Amino acid sequence: MSFFIRKLTLAVIFNSCLFLILFIGIQNSSNKSKVDLLIDETIELPISFIVGSSFILGSIFGNFLVFGMNNE
């Protein structure tokens, strides 16, 4: 169980650091776009934020897939 908690903590810290670096990096971004969702559109967001948050969400979901697998 401690291996699971240690791995989860590492994933949370890594993704939080990526998110912080993302916010620092998009401060001077002037290219903006809307994301077309199935129901509605979002507000205009910097393209770098859209790409970076997609990468971070993929990393989080990938970590959850690894946690779901049994290492027997």
Image: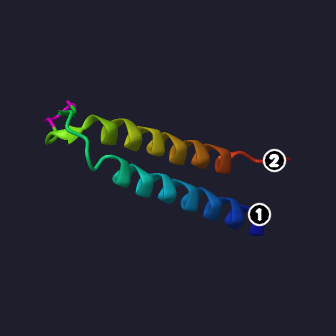
Q: Residue furthest front?
A: 28
Q: Which mark is residue 59?
A: none
Q: Is residue 1 visible?
A: no
The quarter of the displayed image where residue 45 is located? top left
**Which percent across, then down, holds residue 71?**
81, 47
Q: Residue at x 64, y 60 (%)?
A: 10
Which quarter shows the N terminus?
Answer: bottom right
Give above or below for 59 relative to 51.
below
Q: Is residue 38 visible?
A: yes
Q: Residue furthest right?
A: 72
* Residues packed near mark 2 inside 10 Å, few (<14), some (14 to 19) or many (20 plus): few
Q: Residue at x 60, y 56 (%)?
A: 11
Q: Main secondary structure of the magenta part?
A: loop
Q: Which residue is mark 1?
A: 3
The quarter of the displayed image where residue 69 is located? top right
Give above or below for 37 relative to 62.
above
Quick one: SS at disc 2? loop
Circle 2/circle 1 CB separation < 8 Å: no
